[in-house]
Amino acid sequence: MALMGVVSVFAQDGGELRFCLRSEPKTFNPLLVEDEASETIRYLTGGVLVRVNRVTLKAEPELAASWKVFEGGKRIRFKLREGLKYSDGTPFSAADVAYTMEQLMDPALHSSTGDAFRSAEGKLVAQVISLSVVEISFPAPVANLVNLFDTVAILSAKSPQKEMAVLGPFYMAERKAGSYLLLKRNPNYWKKDAAGKQLPYLDSVRIDIEQNPEIEALRFQRGEVHLINTVSPAIFEKLSADNASVRDAGASTDTEQLWFNQVPGSPLPAYKKAWFTSTNFRRAVSEAINRGDLARIVYRGHAVPAIGIISPSNKFWFNSGLKPHPYDTASALRRLQQDGFRLQGDTLRDRAGNAVEFSIVTNAGNRTRESMATMIQQDLRKIGIKVNVVTLDFNSLLERMTQSYNYEACLLGFQNAELDPNSQMAVWLSSADNHQWNPKQTSPATAWEGEIDKLMRAQAASGDEHKRKQYWDRVQQIAWEQEPFIYLINKDALVAIAPAVKNAAPSVFRPQTYWNVETLALTQAH
Amino acid sequence: MKTMRIVAITVLCLTALTILGASYLAPAGYEQQFRETPQAGPSAHHPLGTDDLGRDRWARLLYGMRVSLTLAPLAALFTTVLAGLVGGIAGYYGGWTERCCKLLIDLFLSVPWLFLLITVRAVLPLNVSPEASVTVTFALLGLLGWAASARVICTGAKDLMKSEFVWQARAQGFSGFKLVRLHLLPNLRGALLAQFWISIPVFIIAEANLGALGLGVAEPLPSLGSLLRELQDVVTLRPEPWRLLPLAVLIVVISSFQALLNKQEVRA
Amino acid sequence: MLRFWGWALLRLAAVMLMASFAGAMLMRVAPGFSSDDQELNSGLSAQSIQAIRTAHMADANVPRFYAQYLVSLVKGDLGTSRSLNQPVKDLLRERLPVTLANLAFALAVGWLLGLVLAVAAQTWNVRALTFLANGLSGTFISTPAAALALVFLLLRWPPAFAAALLVFPKIYRYTQNLLQQSCEMPHVLTARAKGAGPWRVMAWHVAPVALPQLIALVGVSVSIGIGVLLPIEVVSDVAGIGQLAWHAAQSRDLPLLVNLTMVVTFMTVCATLISDAAQRGFTRSNA
């Protein structure tokens, strides 16, 4: 509220906020959103029951004036605001919420937003209690239930405009494929500032499709765009040298990691599979990588060496008992010797005499990953391991990772949109598709994966946050010891905000710069 | 124009010497990372400064020239021979042969070969050495790059076949190989040479673009193409003009090459 | 004449069909056809991931896809882009004019520059001019399209001009070589010996010899222009065919790729047919 007070002093109404997206949104149906561009449109246009404040990380009431969770997350009741209207004038009621939830949870829709609510087999029941009260029951408790509603844009059950009728601050007004999208202020938006003035302050938001981050930065320098959500470290340095308004919002929750292919059915030779499934081998590689150098050189200091699954910046969920992985080639060689590896000249050989050589694949065009792989290549040279860096176009890489399993090691990053690690279930369950190093196991291949499976199920079924935290601490401990993923760095969220934009409060969470778009204002109307 | 020729020969000789003596001239290995001094400006230790990972730019330029200026001319030669063959056959025989060749040329110019390149990368083993990978890339470029010039050669050959002196030669009993060797090839040489040297920079640059598909040179091996790719960082480029040197080298070498070829042609 | 155009149309149709089919086959065979980056979305359930893959495999049988495509093509339906969820017809209608305008500009300026410089260098034979022209063409032929496009963005110059500068050296080279060769022909040397001025030699003796090959170059230059323009569009984010083609390739969008191959083939083959026809007309009138 203090923020809103400031707003009314400085803000000048109107104007067009401009920023860029990397690609075209694939869909305007908020229930089918998968890609980042569609997510942006959903964020700017969709009305949600609950919004997670990207700075305080608390759920705040939006369309729902209040809510109550029952049975540890099995049931939730929302009390809705009354008298609200969609952008086309259709009135909003509890029936719309029930309709949206039923649509969302339709198994035939294959919505990732919906899948996040699916904790067990069975159907969801959305019950309209009155015009402004709705109760939703799930077959089993859902972890992190309230925050999940941050991604559910409420559709209208009756509007002839279907998903184009929205409850958010803006509506989609114009679009030219491959070029731009124009969002205009929703005249029926319900929210008002502290002074009673209707939000949003902006008249419109223009989003240009711009694939090249260099051009985006150039246009920012020229004042043609106002915001950049993710700035590369090199551009960040350049812009800050020019005194442009760039900000390091702090360590993000995104991770960059290296992992070895441990799939038993992969087309790799047996001796390589033996290396990759050895904990000592993985930990030796991890110890031989100079993470400090990666952060300092590749990210120009705008990253910190990673410790594990959860970034230390995620204060509640991070297991503070974990120490950073040491950079220690001597210790790495000792671990390798335990497994029968020996250094012959400058070549490491396994027990059978095979020279240790493997390739790291990563996606082509991503300069920071290519650079990291090249640095790891030189680091591992010091313990006699020869690394080949291979960059592949993303689809080819995916096919190798998810279908043919024809790769040795892979370097990629994962985005974690939420603080609550429950969204990583699909990565850590041994039966999951996204259990990258060895997916879709019928039964856990190792004892530690079995233990993680149990902990994962236990945390998902529990409504008690502190208990869940204990389970997650143990998972982090196991992952730290076994290193199926060798976590490299946690990068900072680097953003650029033009001086003309007022009330910006960048967050490390998406959408970093315009998460509070309704209160953003421009000093002069362009 | 004699001085031009001397300059061109000197440049090319120097280039050849640099390529051969890269290991003596370079202050450090092209892959060695001086991690304490990344993105450094020119200094006594690093005449051209260091790149993002602290590697000596001068060493990378020398080795990059070795890779690109050896393989690109080979690929260009290959493509010129192919273009000469297809274009020459079409022009020499005419009729149905010409029609079929032209169809082939059109087809070659229209098919999106990108996917062939992606497939080739998939077939190559992941642990193939950077040298082998870049050789395969240039071989592919040579194999796919002939179509446009074949059309020009075809037209040239067809006109020659109609010219008076070829008629005379035919009347004198020249035919087949002898006619091609004595009359067609010498007169098509200009077009073939132009094609040859135009292909060299085109291939060097194409190799850089293929880096995006995982073909081309792999880290840490440099090529002129991969060094040119750095020019795409427009926002950060301006304060560091020495990063333009790979481009300058390419321009100077290509121009000298061309000056020399033109002269030889005139001499003949 | 009728026979020539009959053959020409047949050739156009044959190349369009073969090229687009070959393109579709190549895309199908290349790795990553059935992959989608959404598979890495940890929020998706196993069933949803399977559904994504199944959707990708809908067009896996390329001959069947192609046959269906041809049937709907006859009805005027170009299909729907899988990755952009938009009818291909709309996409082409929006983007084709942009690319065509840029292409026309690039070719016109490229040809003008190339011809003027080559003819001037040959006629006047001034060392400085030749040096300048060679230097310019050497510079632009050695500059990567992407880098030049970015420099132009920096200078706020139109991307089509970058394409023109990249087309120019090729025109200049071919023309210069041709002119040089023609100048060494016996009848030209004789004319010179008889004291004809440089312009007269160029117009009366050199041009008629070089013209047929130059006309052939017109056809080739269209494909060179397309080849140069497409990457520039991608780098400079011009909403044209090039950007769309790159998108189609990256996202393995089969309907989009097949249509784009058709369009690009149509443009290149038409250009060569027209130059073939012009050449035919020229040699006939000369005979």
Image (cartoon, helix red, strand yellow):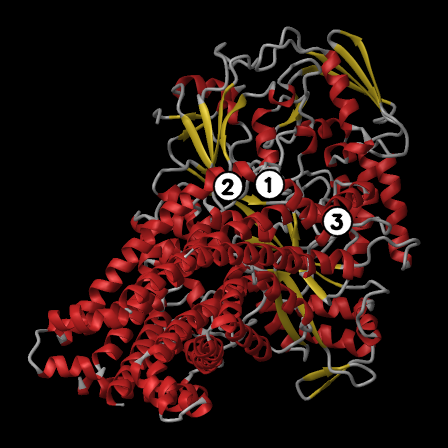
Q: Is residue A458 left or right of residue B55?
A: right
Residue at image point 61% right, 65% down: B116
Q: Secondary structure at mark 1?
A: loop
Q: CA distance from mark 3 to mark 1?
A: 19 Å
Q: Is residue A323 left or right of residue B105?
A: right
Which of discs 2 and 1 lies nearer the camera? The answer is: 1
Q: Amino acid at mark 3?
A: Met
Q: Is residue B68 visible?
A: no
Looking at the picture, does residue A419 appear above or below residue A503? below
Q: CA distance from mark 2 to mark 1?
A: 10 Å
Q: CA distance from mark 3 to mark 2?
A: 25 Å
Q: Position of residue A132 (x, y in %)?
A: 73, 8
Q: Work out whether mark 3 precedes mark 2 in sequence or the reverse, and give the earlier one.
A: 3
Q: Work out whether mark 3 precedes mark 1 in sequence or the reverse, and give the earlier one.
A: 3
Q: Amino acid at mark 1?
A: Leu
Q: Which residue is mark 2?
A: C92
Q: Position of residue A41 (x, y in %)?
A: 57, 31
Q: Is residue B25 left or right of residue B213?
A: left
Q: Position of residue B201 (x, y in %)?
A: 40, 72
Q: Along the line of sight, which residue is nearer the eye, A454 or A125?
A: A125
Which of discs 3 and 2 lies nearer the camera? The answer is: 2
Q: Position of residue A262 (x, y in %)?
A: 81, 64
Q: Along the line of sight, which residue is nearer the eye, A5 or B50?
A: B50
Local packing at callout 2 (Cα closer than 10 Å; few below 14, some 14-19, many 20+) is some
Using the rendered image, report if marks 3 and 1 lie on a common chain.
Answer: yes
Q: Which mark is residue C57?
A: 3
- Circles 2 and 1 in contact, beta carbons < 8 Å: yes
Residue at image point 46% right, 83% down: B70
Q: Amino acid at mark 2?
A: Leu
Q: Which residue is mark 1?
A: C78
